[in-house]
Image: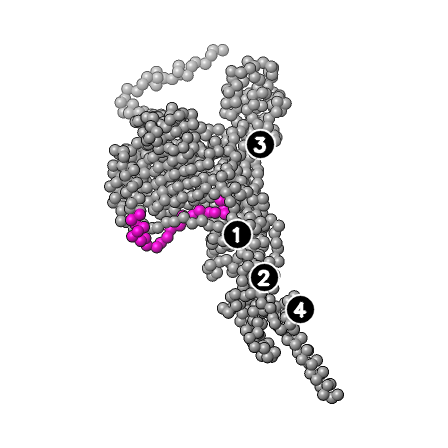
């Protein structure tokens, strides 16, 4: 049988030749597909929304990325962070801002600094480890946007632990090639040093962006919430509105996170290939490669997996090559095999002590709407001129003095920092496996005191999440956990705490003076978007969070019931306040007593009785009552902390009237009346006066009988 002819021989001769018609060639050129290659920097700049750098969020994301890098650099070697960040107007007419950030972290060595600042997809964070960064593109995005929108260089000062001196760089990003452009590099003399400590990093960039009031408030919220979840950091934040300082409230830092081996149940072909390539030059068999490259995988288990994959080779032979088909078999077997749960000791949660300190002293930036005085304006003017002089030492910063001078005399809102101290804080945590990775869910609660409204705080790997709250799993948890676990009904909550009782749209939990904190730490947070602003409900994450919140509600219920009982006692006092003068005057008239202390005695008796009833409501053994706020090294032993701002029912006076404000321990000179009052102290409030009157009538009736008998005799 003849073999079939090739396909080309079947074609007609005129079809094999290129077309001679020029119109036909033009049509073919139109349909020709051209493939181009785009640099990583160009891709991220063109698709900046992937990293969260959208129009109105550019300044917010820039501040966020610089602070996160500073905290990571300090926590790597357990250095107490000291961060100075400044965001000021550079050229208001062109929407130019100058952003400056300095930290006392480990710094970056001079040979790696240009690539670390300007080259995308080059980072020290590409490992299995809990860390704030996810893609390693935040700092590069700041540098790229500065290069794209302005002609100012990126100024960097760095003093690394690996080097003795301090280096100064002026850089720009070549967006077309993803390479840094080094305009200037020099070693700084000690007299001109910008970094005081043994190590540190400072960067100054000029960005073009609009700052709307919503974004401005988000930046303030981000800095304040960062100070709450990192109370061991000293943060100075300077803006056109003034300088805000967030003190370090503790010297205790969380244990730094550690790199961990991947779990075998999360194995894929690429991960297995990397593991084999790392040991390619060593005399080691495949079972040992699996043991050394994955956690919770013993040598016997590895041999069993290889045998189940039907791989026929000698385990002692190290020269055997493996095809992708063989490796896929191993991956599929691992997906079906049950392993022990992954380790959790490599994670770095906030911890009960540190989070409690943060919740007990919440820093917040508030706007005072009062008009500024001339002295305040003069102080700000002097500060702005001094700042302009500092920035004017470089040739490209000469416009600063003009810009700052143009802003002098303009009235601005007066901002200040407040510290909120709640009555009660509580803490609990859960550990689970989400997407084959260990995850720790920490939940905190702050109630009462200076807190006067509801607020939900969301954190992921110690990063505050401020946008997209409506789509976050934390919002779903708060909506689904019923308020009855607080020991009160929806009706009671709205009657006692709601400011607008007629409104039916308010969610019940949002009328309470309560702050709820959720922190999730893991080597891989299940973010919904690349902007890292909301967390998806994956696996059992929501059930763990609901369990934590329900537990905190139960602990808070004791305090709320006490407060409701106190309000009930105050309402009773109002009733007694109305009727007590009439009762006292009737008794004094019947006894013929003048200037008696009955009013004070009755007030004291009623006060003690109502206070005793209010205190004896569901005392919780977990409540720790301290007379002083937590100091810098405070680590609470209990999961429920009651601050010194708690309502002390024994010390609080239930005022009867204006004449009864200062009630002392006065004794009644009339011994019979004192005996009657002491005998009736255990009775109810309503029967107190009646019982005394009945006894007094009986005594008078007996005396009258004795007098009649004596007259007859």
Q: Earlier in the sequence, mark 2 or mark 4?
A: 2
Tag 4 residue: 679
Label 1 and label 3: CA atoms lie apart by 41 Å
Tag 1 residue: 644
Viewer-proximal residue among 624 and 156: 624
Residue at figure coordinates x 51%, y 60% from the top left: 495
**Where residue 458 appears, x then y in whole percent?**
48, 43
Residue 103 appears in the figure: yes
Task: Check disc 3 and report its element: helix, strand or loop.
Answer: loop
Where residue 341 sits, quadrant-wise, is top right
Q: Earlier in the sequence, mark 2 or mark 3?
A: 3
Instruction: Please give left or right for residue 615 compared with residue 89 in the image.
Output: right
**Where residue 319 appears, x then y in whole percent?**
55, 13
Instruction: Decide: few, some or many residues near mark 2? Use Cα within 10 Å; few <14, some 14-19, many ≥20.
Output: many
Label 1 and label 4: CA atoms lie apart by 36 Å
Q: Per the image, is 373 magenta?
A: yes
Q: Mark 1 or mark 3, which is nearer to you?
A: 1
Task: Check disc 4 and report its element: helix, strand or loop.
Answer: helix
């Amino acid at each position: 049988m003849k073999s079939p002819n090739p396909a080309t021989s079947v074609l007609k001769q005129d079809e094999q030749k290129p077309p001679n018609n020029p119109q036909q060639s033009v049509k073919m050129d139109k349909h020709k597909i051209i493939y181009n290659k785009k640099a990583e920097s160009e891709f991220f700049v063109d698709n900046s929304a992937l990293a969260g750098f959208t129009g109105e969020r550019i300044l917010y994301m820039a501040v966020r990325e610089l602070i996160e890098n500073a905290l990571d650099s300090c926590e790597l070697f357990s250095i107490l962070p000291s961060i100075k960040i400044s965001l000021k107007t550079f050229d208001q007419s062109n929407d130019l801002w100058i952003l400056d950030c300095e930290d006392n972290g480990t710094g970056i060595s001079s040979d790696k600094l240009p690539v670390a600042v300007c080259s995308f997809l080059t980072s020290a964070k590409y490992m299995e480890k809990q860390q704030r960064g996810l893609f390693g593109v935040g700092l590069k995005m700041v540098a790229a946007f500065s290069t794209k929108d302005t002609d100012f260089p990126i100024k960097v000062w760095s003093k690394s632990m690996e080097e003795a001196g301090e280096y100064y760089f002026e850089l720009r990003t070549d967006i077309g090639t993803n390479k840094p452009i080094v305009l200037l590099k020099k070693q700084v003399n000690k007299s001109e040093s910008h970094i005081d400590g043994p190590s540190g990093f400072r960067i100054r960039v000029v960005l073009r962006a609009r700052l709307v009031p919503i974004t401005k408030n988000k930046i303030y919220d981000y800095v304040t919430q960062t100070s709450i979840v990192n109370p061991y950091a000293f943060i100075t934040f300077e803006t056109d509105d003034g300088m805000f300082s967030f003190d370090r409230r503790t010297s205790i830092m969380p244990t730094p996170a550690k790199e961990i081996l991947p779990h075998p149940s999360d194995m894929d072909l690429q991960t297995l290939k990397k593991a084999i390539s790392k040991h390619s030059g060593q005399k080691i068999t495949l079972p040992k490669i699996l043991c050394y490259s994955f956690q919770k995988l013993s040598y016997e288990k590895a041999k069993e997996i290889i045998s189940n994959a039907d791989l026929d080779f000698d385990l002692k032979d190290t020269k055997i090559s493996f095809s992708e088909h063989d490796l896929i078999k191993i991956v599929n077997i691992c997906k079906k095999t049950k392993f022990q749960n992954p380790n959790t000791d490599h994670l770095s949660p906030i911890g009960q002590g540190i989070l409690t300190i943060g919740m007990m002293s919440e820093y917040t930036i508030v706007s005072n709407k009062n008009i500024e005085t001339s002295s305040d304006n003069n102080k700000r003017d002097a500060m702005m001129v001094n700042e302009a002089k500092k920035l004017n030492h470089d040739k490209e910063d000469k416009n600063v003095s003009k810009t700052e001078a143009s802003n002098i005399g303009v009235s601005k809102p007066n901002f200040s920092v407040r510290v909120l101290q709640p009555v009660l804080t509580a803490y609990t945590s859960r550990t689970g496996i989400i997407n084959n990775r260990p995850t720790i869910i920490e939940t905190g609660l702050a109630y009462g005191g200076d807190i006067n409204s509801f607020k939900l705080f969301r954190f992921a790997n110690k990063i505050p999440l401020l946008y997209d709250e409506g789509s976050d799993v934390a919002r779903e948890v708060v909506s689904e956990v019923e308020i009855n676990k607080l020991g009160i009904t929806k009706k009671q909550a709205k009657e006692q705490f709601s400011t607008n009782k007629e409104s039916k749209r308010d969610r019940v939990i949002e009328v309470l003076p309560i702050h709820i904190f959720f922190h999730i730490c893991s080597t891989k947070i299940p973010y919904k978007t690349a902007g890292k602003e909301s967390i998806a409900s994956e696996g059992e994450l929501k059930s763990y969070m609901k369990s934590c919140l329900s537990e905190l509600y139960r602990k808070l219920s004791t305090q709320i019931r006490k407060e409701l009982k106190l309000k009930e006692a105050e309402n009773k006092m109002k009733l007694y306040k109305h009727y007590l003068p009439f009762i006292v005057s009737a008794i004094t008239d019947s006894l013929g007593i003048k200037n008696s202390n009955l009013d004070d005695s009755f007030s004291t008796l009623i006060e003690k009785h109502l206070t005793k009833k209010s205190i004896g409501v569901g005392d919780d053994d977990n409540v720790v009552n301290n007379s002083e706020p937590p100091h810098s090294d405070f680590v609470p032993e209990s999961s429920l902390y009651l601050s010194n701002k708690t309502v002390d029912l024994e010390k609080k006076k239930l005022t009867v009237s204006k004449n009864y404000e200062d009630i002392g321990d006065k004794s009644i000179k009339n011994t019979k009346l004192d005996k009657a009052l002491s005998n009736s102290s255990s009775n109810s409030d309503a029967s107190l006066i009646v019982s005394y009157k009945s006894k007094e009538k009986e005594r008078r009736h007996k005396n009258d009988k004795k007098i009649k008998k004596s007259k007859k005799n």
